Image: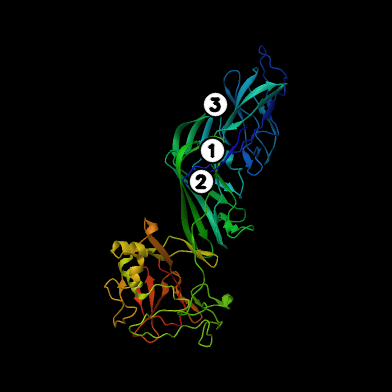
Amino acid sequence: MNIKLSYHWAIAAFLTVFASCSSDDITTGTVTKPDADKTETNQVSFVAGNQGTRTSLNYDKSNFYWEAGDKIFVKDDDNKFYGSSNAVTGTNVPSFKFMMPGKYSKNKYMVYYPGKDKTNDNVTIAATQTQNGADNTMHFGTSGDCGVGEATLEGGQYKFKLTHSAAYLCFKPSYDHPLETSYVTKVEVTADQNIAGNYTLGSDGKLTYKDGGSKTITLTPKETGSTEGFQLKKNLSKPGCETGRMFMVIAPGKYKLTVKYYIKDTQTSTMGTITKTFGSSTYEANGYYDMPAKLTMRAFDAKYYTWDAKKDYWFGHENDQPKANGSNNIKTFPTSSDAQRWYNPLKYQVGVNNAASNSAKNCPNINELHWYCLKGDPRWDTTTMWTVWGHIYTNGMWFKKAEVIAKENNKGSAAALKLASPDDRNRVINGIFETPSNNKNVATGAPTNRKDYFFMPAMGYYKDNELKDFRAAGFFWTSTPEAYVSQGVYNLYFTSNNVVISNLRARSNGLKLWTSE
């Protein structure tokens, strides 16, 4: 058997191929030499040797095995298909004696394996496939694995090399940050042509399409003791998490593939999808293709700050930090007695560059905030997944990047947005008594041209020992104090239908930091 093991990269087709070869022995139980003049009426034994091609794979060692229910089919001297009268029992069986009815007097015969529960040369590449256990390929036979081999009489035994006729995809998604209760529940592959359906298996090993075609194959992974799929588990050799390998059988051919991973966090009940696209490439029969999948989710830190504090809100008390909406009974939130975690009392002065000097110094100023709010095309998104505290969440807002806003408004560069608001007033040095602006023209859904936008999570804020509005709203400091509200500071506040330039949040509250994009 020839095995081609390939590493297949998104967009570019980068293939690394390994090859191995093995043979299955087929022996006759009633004769040692064929006799053309003799009609054989007894069943003949076709014995698959212990080095042959099987219907499940040890991916690391390239060892193949027969699995329970497997049968082979052979055309006898009358050109009539016969299936073995017995089937494999047990799992990971290295050799098995198949008993074949029919007449066998020639030196060569074609052996057909059409897949489990299929007959003769009829093959079905399944549009729905299920894998029980990580790294397990025992589902190959029911998913569409198939192949042929020419059996030749040698020294009283029929020997053959069985070559698989399907192609095989290997998925092992990974994520760079720790996750605790997250699972891959489904893998969906869609092509620009049929990759599943009913086929005829030719004596040359090629599959000819008949009917029942599908451009999409769905693989459902199932782990013993769980109904959620394969868990993204901690990688012991490096930071992050990964699943066990998942395998899919597809019809060979040249395709553009789209792979969609369905993700679920069982603790937060967050569900979403991550999509990878692969450019046109040939997936050959008997080829095994690694489909790299680094799952793309934004990881945010768990730090909040009182305005321009030197240290974050829960510094030194991280274990006391509430991680869901609501309060705890531990009174370790910042107070004025903690100079490191307490806010900067800076007062606004007209005519000077009023700006934070500690943690908030790199946040956008009030001029920039006006541009983001009024010209940033805000888009509320409930599908994009992000992580914090080892869990997955959704909900947040997309804004156009500063350089895009500047270009669209003829401002030359993003730096120009710092100098004045869209009405050409510099609110950093000239305090204006006004009701701050807001924008209720909020679109829904992620932008199609994401490279022009950046994403901000709805991570709420802290008031004393309580987390508020987590996943419902976003609260982010600017670097500019407010001129007319005592201890006021400008901040960004957004919900699903409103983006607000706020001056009402007390400096003692814990808000997120951000930088201009």
Q: Amino acid at mark 3?
A: Asp
Disc number lying in front (3 or 2): 2
Badge 2: how crowded within 10 Å, few (<14), some, or many (20+)?
some
Residue 418, image x, y percentages: 35, 72
Q: What SS does tag 2 mark?
A: loop
The residue at 61%/46% (across/down) is 136
Display coloring: rainbow
Looking at the rendered structure, the number of numbered marks drawn on it comes to: 3
Q: What SS does tag 1 mark?
A: strand
The residue at 29%/80% (across/down) is 435
**Residue wearing tag 1:** 167
Would you say the residues marked 2 and 1 are in contact, meaning their CB atoms lie under 8 Å apart?
no
Residue 419, image x, y percentages: 33, 73
In the rendered structure, the answer to whether residue 367 lies left or right of residue 228 reads: left
Residue 58, image x, y percentages: 65, 43
Would you say the residues marked 3 and 1 are in contact, meaning their CB atoms lie under 8 Å apart?
no
Q: Which mark is residue 9?
A: 2
Q: Quadrant of residue 64?
A: top right
Q: Quadrant of residue 85?
A: top right
Examine the rendered structure and indicate whether residue 147 appears above or below residue 310.
above
In the rendered structure, the answer to whether residue 466 lies left or right of residue 374 reads: right
Residue 67, image x, y percentages: 64, 39
Examine the rendered structure and indicate whether residue 458 appears above or below residue 343.
above
The residue at 28%/63% (across/down) is 410
**Residue wearing tag 3:** 204
Q: What SS does tag 3 mark?
A: loop
